[in-house]
Image (cartoon, helix red, strand yellow):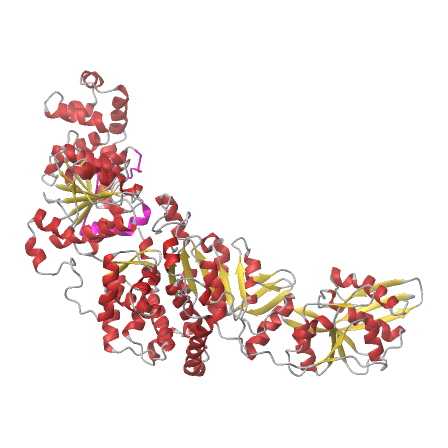
Amino acid sequence: MNSVSGITLRGVKAVPVEVEVEITGGLFNISVVGLPDAAVREARERVRAALRSVGITLRGRVAINLAPADVPKEGALLDLAIAVAIACVQGGVKVKKPSLFIGELALDGRLRKIRGAVPAAFLAREKGWDIYLPEENAEEVSLVEGVSAWRVKSLGDLFAHLRGEIELAGVGYCEADFAPPQADPDFSDIKGQSAAKRALEIAAAGHHNLLLVGSPGSGKTLLARALKGILPPLSDPELMEVLLLRSTVGNSISSVRERPFRSVHHTASAVALCGGGTTLRPGEISLASRGVLFLDEFPEFTRDVLEALRQPLEDGQITVSRASGSVVYPAKVLMVAACNPCPCGFAGDPVERCTCSPSALDRYRRRLSGPILDRIDLHISIPRLLPEELVSLEGKCGESSAEVAERVRAAREIQVKRWSKYGIGSNSEIPEKLLRRNIALIPEVKSFLLQALNRVRLSGRGLSRVLKVSRTIADLSASEEIRLEHVAEALSYREGEALSWMKI
Amino acid sequence: MDENLKTLLLLNSLEGQGRKLWFALKRGLISHDELWKCDAKLFTELGITERAIVAIKTKIDMRWAEIEMEKCLKLDIRAVGIEDEDYPAKLNDLNDPPLILYWHGSEKRIPHKCIGAVGTRRASTYGRRTALRIGEYCAHAGIPLISGGASGIDGNAHMGACTSGGKTFAVFGTGADVYFPQSNANLFREIRDCGALISEFPIGSQGEQWHFPRRNRIVAALSSKLIVVEAPLKSGAMITAGFAAELGREVWAVPGRIDEESAFGSNKLIFDGAYPLIDLKDFFETNTRASAVFSNNDLKADPVSDIDLSHEEEEILKVLRFGGGQTVDNIALEVKMSAAGILKIIAILSAKGIIYSSGSGRYSANV
């Protein structure tokens, strides 16, 4: 018996599906059993036409069984496996070694790109099988080490290869380029906003979530996009995680080690954000994992969507459970939220007048509070620069993203060295217990902090946030000791401080 | 005594008609018993409207005054009658002094010398900041601050007084137990401990539109000097200023920008003859005879005088003192420092309370 297998996706995992075919006499009929979804059932037509194009004409009753029978099968990527299994019975093709066949068939026998090639490659590597996949998926699979994969252009080529007539091209392993991706926009492209840039640098270095408050046109979105450019490139394990997710949803990859940046519109549903549906698709928070999740117009998001974000932000992963099963997706994101200071957007602006009524302001700001904001370490307000200010900044471009990225990288290295024995990767994840034990303050800083505590009424949670951010700022200046200036700067990113001009 | 208070509570709830009855009672045109028996004929002779008579009747029948007294007791709110010794004498300057002041707070009396600070709810950062400073100065000079408890200028003035350990009184346009706006609820709880919440409206009254001008006349009457911090042309603060001028109180106004609508009213007051408030320290020194308080330097009038500043800190402070509302980038153009260095110093200066954030990403110096 030939062992022909395809896969079906279960979250980011590929589940092997053995394809069996029996052809008996009788009136022509093809039936597929084994919980196929609509796309798999329609494979009949594609497979029949594709086989005809290579000269195999189906006759009789064709029964196709997809095992295991109790796992739902989805997607068009089983087309190729079915075609090969039929060809083994009727077309004189032999599969000598257990192999995975994935690909969607065109009616003329060409192979089309599919989603899920990387999970399939992982499965093949684990089982020691060969894998045959569409030419267009070869690039992503080439990033996975130790897979014996073959590029397939068309069904005819594949059959010729299996019969030993020609040799298909293999997919060689090529290590992802470590050269940092081009930052777009670059820090030096953004005029002024040095305060915001500094906050971005701290956020990137310590993986602190960030809230940007500013009038329309002040550059919140631009700044958030620039954050991507100063994050260190993906490491190998991170790259694999990101690759798996991207391949699962079929997103193409432009620059390999670039971190994901997902901008979510405020009309997004909780399912779109967190993942779900009958096929248990990953949500935006998982697609942004190891990268940036940008929530523009933060107060406009519905409360239940924001509440749903709380747990994944806390745990760095999300369990999507539905009737059809449950899957754990990674959700290690750097969340950047942005909002206007008031409904009209011009509160605190030096020129434009705010036209909001006090009660509208009150309502708006109430929406801006809540448990989710407790997960945000850095609050920063962004000034809308006046035309004359913009002109005076002409020609002063400041640091480039590459220079900042270098400092961020160094600071991250220090953190990894310090915290890896506790199993945490960045300052933002330090648990309360470790924080108190590991962060010793010099007397001068202690008394300063005490003074500040009295002045600003910092809560216990607020204090630990300030300490974490201080730790990151100290790491950025490669100082083992947390000094006064570090704490003072961390205090200025507190909610009450950065947004104090909005109060009452 | 109790009977008297009950009568006052009842009459106070009837507004103008109640006041008419009160004067009749004082002049002996009607006796206490007659009032409570609710003699319709006698009432009509005194010029009481039919509607008011019906209202009095129902209120007497449902024992409204007794219930109101119980409510006061339960909420720990005092009802101070017009003849009570704790009743602020200055209110008698009004044509229509409130018959009852509902009083909720630790302070039992309002001293004779008080400063009122009022202004718009939609204040600029400058206005709110100035209100806060006025509150702080009042606290340090030991003068109670009166305001209307609204958001914006009022709230900041109260807050400045509260946080600096001064006394402050908020006059409500709602019942003394109804906190409006709700966003100031925490502030009101603090005012309860360092002053009092005052209202002439019965327990549980919601803020009707006509309540607020009535409230303003009390604010004006209670203050010996009234400061209008920032007010547009048509606003409650302008009404308060009008009352204050009528009552012969000194009216001061904080000069505002001439291109900002929220300061049109306060600027107009100056044009019309109000004193311009151009120097807080000066105002409190000359107007309060409390110079002793100021000379011993515990006032934050010059916060920098006793703090050692590094050369860099002084340089940035100099820039901000010359012109407020600067972004980090603007400062970077003026001083020879890196943006990160400036941020560090700004953080330290604002932690020390020498500068403050005056707008979205903008900083100003405390004067």
Q: Position of residue A383 (x, y in %)?
A: 37, 57
Tell me if residue B3 can be seen: no
- Looking at the image, residue A359 sits to the left or right of residue A442; the answer is right
Q: Nearer the viewer, residue B11 or B63?
A: B11
Q: How many marks?
A: 0
Residue at left offset 6%, top offset 49%: B289
Q: Quadrant of the image for the N terminus of chain A? A: bottom right
Residue at left offset 56%, top offset 74%: A257
Tell me if residue B325 can be seen: yes
Residue at left offset 38%, top offset 65%: A194
Q: Quadrant of residue B218?
A: top left
Q: Position of residue A224 (x, y in %)?
A: 47, 63
Range shown magenta: B181-209
Q: Nearer the viewer, residue A408 or A388?
A: A388
Q: Check if residue A453 falls in the magenta segment.
A: no
Q: Position of residue B75 (x, y in %)?
A: 24, 45
Seen as rendered, the residue at the extreme right is A26
Q: Quadrant of residue A133?
A: bottom right
Q: Nearer the viewer, residue B37 or A182?
A: A182
Seen as rendered, the residue at the extreme front is A395
Q: Nearer the viewer, residue A55 or A226?
A: A226
Q: Position of residue A426 (x, y in %)?
A: 43, 75
Residue A402 vertical placement versus B93 (above, below): below
Residue B285 vertical placement versus A28 (above, below): above
- Looking at the image, residue B109 sits to the left or right of residue A175; the answer is left
